Amino acid sequence: MGAHPPTTTDGRTTGDPGADRSPEGLQAGLKNRHLSMIAIGGVIGAGLFVGSGAGIAAAGPGILLSYALTGLLVVLVMRMLGEMAAASPTSGSFSTYADRALGRWAGFTIGWLYWFFWSVVLAVEATAAAAILTNWVPAVPQWAWALLVMIVLTGTNLISVGSFGEFEFWFAGIKVAAIVIFIVAGALAVFGLPPGDEAVGLSNLTGHGGFLPHGPGAILSGMLLVVFSFMGSEIVTLAASESPNPVQAVRKATNSVIWRIAIFYLGSIAVIVSLLPWDDKGVEKSPYVAVLQSLDIPYAGTVMDVVVLTAVLSCLNSGLYTASRMAFSLGERGDAPKSFTRVNKGGVPAVSIWASVAFGFIATIFSYTSKDTIFQFLLNSSGAVALFVWLVICFSQLRMRRTIERDTPERLTVRMWLYPYLTYATIALILFVVGYMFYNPEGRQQMIMSVAVGALVLVVGLVRDRVRRGRTTAAGEDTGTDTGTGTGTGVEDARTDDLTRS
């Protein structure tokens, strides 16, 4: 027998025409710099710039604890996801792992809910971008701007994954640069630098009612307002499968998530609540603009509009990519139309992209025609998907860790800390947040609608799984073939074997 050809770390053969494609047939066109900036910028969403004011108003300076607790939750979940993704990179990420570890129903349910979430996000971000652009050029109607933004970013996603990566590289770069400059300038002002400026100090953290002006319970209320701004950290684990070295990309992104959250979220929010009183009306309306104005930065509002527009376009770009790759993965597993797996000449799943864009367009239309009814339902029913995703990641990691340790321990290059105890603690914390949302009047409607939609998708998934099992069993009986090994069908055994494949 001849010598085996050299392979890449994820099993791809070097020097092979197919080496530039992922195991699923997608183009491996994302460069290391693309993935690095996607990982860094993925945690900086428009919600940080726009939604942080509501959190500060709800919890005062104590919002820092809300961000710290939520950030800790994200770090733990990302560590679990990184463990699975490093062992088996795939475009379906946690949905694929849920399919393998928990059952077809789990992968089906969380995959479609995640697709639904990001498809709704497309409408939200397109509308937000259009609002900013209309302020600059009022002669163009807002719906036209929304349409234009969607068309442009759809085009970039259809050309190639490298095109998506390049746009995201520059979008994320602008966000990162803006946050770093903001933190440095704000910190200098807090401590009275350069000399001659009056130091603000840390008095605003304890003044105006104290660090927790609304009591300790406000920390949880703040968590409900900020938890969803962290959605997007997991995108890099989907994108890694379309890079030359997915294992290294996942490992790097997982290890850096702690400092990314600490700097961009905690750092910038600490500057805001230290430099200005938390109950300042400007802080509640637009905290970053208020800080820039306090520093006498000219055209502060316009500067932040540019930054927010960049963040919105970045989120829309990433949302379209993420929704399409999840649809592609669902198609590959037989949980979506097979056409979703068709790849165009650029190596991207064109049908999946168009399907996601179509839903996004419809939702955008509803944002103008039925804002308080249908569109509000879409927002509420997708609002808690982040918590569902995190729970599924936790339960999948509990199952997959044992399988990986038994069958392919050499692939366990990223390990969850203090397994399984921290995994159980993370599950408990997420369930606590879910319970508090049911208790809290502001979060109750969102959670009820999200659970209702999730239950509907779950029922569909269970029915599909039962039908699939019945067909498999019938096929085995017709051919006289044993479809299982005592514990399940041949499909289940194949899925279990797939746990160890990259």
Image (tube, grey):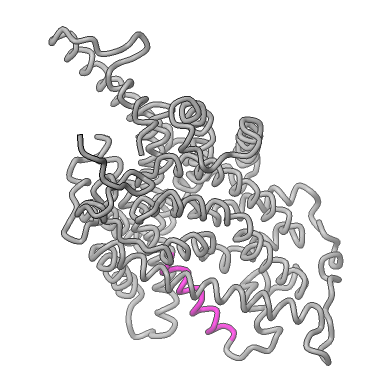
Q: Quadrant of residue 204?
A: bottom right
Q: Quadrant of the N terminus?
A: top left
Count of all numbered marks drawn on residues in the image: 0
Q: Quadrant of residue 179?
A: bottom right
Residue visible at 54% across and 52% down in the picture: 228
Q: Main secondary structure of the magenta part?
A: helix
Residue visible at 71% across and 78% down in the picture: 186
Residue 480 image point, x, y percent: 16, 7
Q: Residue furthest left?
A: 479
From what the image shows, is residue 113 above or below residue 30?
Answer: above
Residue 139 image point, x, y percent: 34, 86
Residue 486 image point, x, y percent: 35, 8
Q: Is residue 164 magenta?
A: no
From what the image shows, is residue 179 above or below residue 243?
Answer: below
Q: Is residue 485 left or right of residue 455?
A: left
Q: Is residue 502 left or right of residue 302?
A: left
Q: Quadrant of the C terminus?
A: top left
Q: Is residue 302 magenta?
A: yes
Residue 488 image point, x, y percent: 34, 14
* Foreground pick, 407 / 7: 7
User: Can residue 75 be seen by looking at this rendering?
Assistant: yes
Q: Is residue 238 left or right of residue 212?
A: left
Q: Is residue 362 left or right of residue 235?
A: left
Residue visible at 38% across and 85% down in the picture: 137
From what the image shows, is residue 326 above or below residue 493?
Answer: below
User: Can residue 456 be seen by looking at this rendering?
Assistant: no
Query: What segment is highlighted magenta in the picture?
Result: 300-314
